[in-house]
Each structure stands twice: as C-alpha cells, then as structure tokens.
Amino acid sequence: MLSMNGTGAQVASGHPETTNAACEVLAAGGNAVDALVAAAWTACVAEPIFCSPGGGGHAMIRMPGRAPVIADFFAQTPRRRRMDDLEFYPIHGNFGTDVQEFHVGMGAAATPGMVAGLFELQRRHGSLPMTALVEPAVTVAREGCALTETQAFALQILEPIVRATPEASAMFGLDAHDGPLPRVGTVVTNRPLADWIERIAVDGPDALHHGEQAIAIAEDAQAHGGHLTLADLAGYRVHWRRPMRWTLGDATVWSNPPPAFGGLMVALMTQALEHRLPAGVRFGDDAHLDALTEAMGVSERERQRLEQPDTLGCSRRLMQTFRQLEGELRVSRGTTHIGVRDAAGGFAGMTASNGEGCGRIVPGTGFMLNNMLGEEDLNRPGFHNWPLNRRLASMMAPTLVLRNGRRVLLGSGGSNRIRTAIAQVLANLMHFDLDLAEAICAPRLHLEGDRLAIEHPHPDWPAQVADWLARSAPEARCWPAPNLYFGGVHAVADDAAAADPRRGGTARSLN
C-alpha cells in the first residue's frame, strides 16, 4: 500500500495502473470525473476479475458548488426468462479459510451498464473527450500489465471461470485450456480489448446497446443458453439518484440509495455502532469488540428482515426506504473501488463489479460478461425467479463524509463485507481518530448470519483480543492474515489518499 498526504489532487484504487491512469488525466487538465472514467477503463484491463465493460457500478459525484449525486449504471435483469437449454452451473471459489459457491455460464449474465455509465459520467460532468480518456487503458492493454499478487490470488480463487472457455483462458494469457495460471509478475496483454475500447470511444455506447455489438451479444446468448436479447441492451438506461443522507456524531454522511442495498446497511451499522461505543474506549478493547459485533448483528438482522418487509422493526424513515426494496435483487461479489479528488475540490468515486464473470467473452471484444444472475444470496427462493426488467440492487456503497470541513470519499469491494468494511473504517476515523491509512489497514471483523469472521492474529490487535474470542466468539473463523475477503477500502480526502493492501491498493497525491 502507498499512502501520501497533501492538499492537491488525490487518487486511490485497487491497482497501480488504475491509479496511474487517473493521475495521467489529472496532470493533463482533466477534472475528477475525467480521471475516474479513465481509471475505470484501465481497471477493466488491469483488474479484469473485478471490473469489466460487461458489468456495472455506482458512482458518487460531488463537483465544486454542487450537491452530491449518485449515478446508477448497475446491471439489469432481462425482459424475458429463458427456461430451456440454459448454460448455468456452479463453481467453487476457495479463499483459503472459506469456500463460496458461484453460478456461471451465459444464463447467469444480466444486462450490463458499465459502458453506458462511463459515457454518461463523461457527458454530464467530464471536460475531456472520451477518446483522450481511454488512452491509458488502450496503452496498458496493448503493452501489457504485470499480474499483481491480488489479481493472481483472484485468478486462483476463480480458476474454474478462467478455464470455462478457450476464449476466457486466452484473455488471461493462457496458451491452452489446461495450461498453468500466470504467476505474479507475468505480463498479460489484451489486444482485442485495446482495439475495442479504442473503437467504442469513437462510436459511443450505442455501438454496444444498439449496433453490431448488441446483435453479436444477443446471438451469442441465444446460441449458448443465455437470456439476453436486443431489447435488453437497447432498453438500458443510466439512472441519476439523490444519495441517502444521515448524521453520524458531528459528521454528515451520504451514500448509495435504494434500489441499492449497501448505503442502507452502512447507515444502520454506523448508527448502531455509534450508539453502542462508550466514550473513552480504545481500539480492540472488549467494549469496542462487543459494540462492533452487536452493531453487525443489527445490520445482519435488518438485512434478513428485508425479505419480510411487513415485519421490519426500524425507524419510520428507514422503514419507508426499506419498503422501496421489496421485490428488488441484491448482489455484488467481485468488486473494486476507485476514488479521485481533483485540485479544485471535486470528488468522484466509483464501485464497479462484474460479479465473478460468467465465463463467456463477448465476441470480438476481449472482455467477459457478468454473472449477476448467478449469485446465491439474491436468489434465496431459488434461481431463475428474478423479476423481469428490474435494476439489480447491489451491496455497493460509495460514501462521502463531511466532518469539520474535511471531506472523505470512500468505498469498498467485497459483497456482503462491504457494509462492515466501510462502517469499521468510518468508526476508526471518527471514534478512534486514526489517520486514513491506519483506519483502512486496521484488522476487521465480519458477521454473516450468526458466524463471526475475524482477521486474527494481527499485530494491531491488543493482546486481550484472544481472550475475548475465547469467551465471546469461540466458533469464530480466524483468518491468520489480512485477506481480500474482508473487502478493499480505498479512500481520498481533502488532504490525503489511502488504499487497502488487502486488494493491492495504490494511492497517490499530486501536489
């Protein structure tokens, strides 16, 4: 991890090339949104497990003199449900301490929104042409990108998807379907993706949603057991939303609103934690751990109650907000976050996801479609029961905080761990007065159902944590080292930037 302080522009992301792209555009006179868009295109090249033109995302934008806004360009469910000859099957991802099941195949692909979102961000708030903003990504795709430890680990976790088709194997630099996975430091190129990004920068998003590319996707879905049609691609729209807003002590917080799920969970957990943390408690004390696990329990119970909206036990305002989620779908697995502050004080942050990818490469493009319809946590009544033509409601929560005149924009990847990662970083900043890098690197907990996971042992925990675990959480899963399972929080502030080493984060300051 790299963390630097300053009063100029700030960038934080999950990969050095992603951060470099944003810095290059800022140095060329672009604003925060220009830099964000350039970084996102580059993440599609450098972080293909987490980010793809075949996925979607949410962006928090706070331009100088304007109120914060959210751009929703997440994936959409198809307009019809195919029931015969679906390509849809399970694979297992091994995190080391935990194993998760994912479902992939063309039948797991929802309508992508990433490309439409990037063009809409540039159109509404950018100052440079898209042809300039894609240049860093095109260069990286053609000249190659060295595989980082985080990306190599992610490839190991999702190896069955990487090997799902010969085209997928080729995208990750494999010479043969059964060849060895590339190692850390291996330079991987993606010339088809470079050519496609260069073309679409000129042709615009209609090329993907209405033109020959749309026809190719629809035909590929028809041929390989998918749901997507031309009508799905042509009907996709980016939505601009007013963020959720709440107070937290002496701070004001904005985050992702419904139909997204993440902002609600961050609000619930941060408020529950604030009410439970006693004054004077130190990081890692029993009182801190008790309060944290109780607050996680509150947010987890409310998450489960969302499936029974008539029995919600929360405030009137949150109840009204929660009710908007009835019938929505909730998803976000393989995610990455990018944050930018420009020298004029504009903030732009994006959390993007491709799920884990469905294993199918869009013909002639060099990128993989998402597998958003294959996420078990959004299909509790059973797969293939999703409502038609509905925006998926993700766990993503790009979040802006204003406290004592200082602004911090942060976000995280990590599926259900997003809410707990962001809430813990906010508590570290606001209650324990850690600096930005310390707040992000501090060890984390996560509660899933009634099962606690914790990064332990960890040098930043006090010694009594072992006694607390033995007494209060003897069945906890202990992760012996920081792990991307616990998310990857990247953040920019008015005076600093910091990125999460759990996901290979890189932060830079431009003074």
Image (cartoon, rainbow, N blue to C red):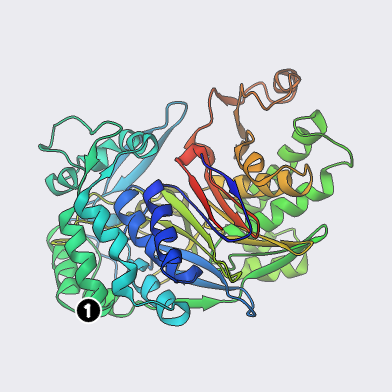
Where disc 1 sits, the SS reads helix
In this picture, residue 501 sits left or right of residue 247 = left
Q: In the figure, is residue 489 to the left or right of 182?
A: right
Rendered location of residue 348, percent (x, y): 53, 66
Quarter of the figure with residue 405: bottom right
Residue that appears at 58% across and 65% down:
256
Residue 142: image location, x then y, percent: 19, 54
Of 459 and 262, the residue lying toward us:
459
Horizontally, is 270 left or right of 493 in the view?
Answer: right
Q: Is residue 253 above or below residue 182?
A: below
Q: In which quarter of the image is the C terminus?
A: bottom right
Which residue is pictured at 66% across the width and 21% down the height? 474
Instruction: Give the residue number, with chain letter if any, for mark 1.
Output: 203
Q: Is residue 368 visible?
A: no
* Placement of 326 over or under 4, stated as above or below: below
Name the amino acid type tagged 1: Asp
Task: Kindly indicate the quadrant of the structure image that contains residue 73.
Answer: bottom left
What residue is at 39 percent from the left and 37 percent from the top? Answer: 150
How many labels were placed on the picture?
1
Q: Residue furthest front?
A: 511
What residue do we see at 19% from left, 43% from top? 164
Relative image position of residue 184 (x, y in whole percent): 30, 32
Percent position of residue 216, x then y? 14, 69
Q: In this view, does 504 lie above or below 331?
A: above
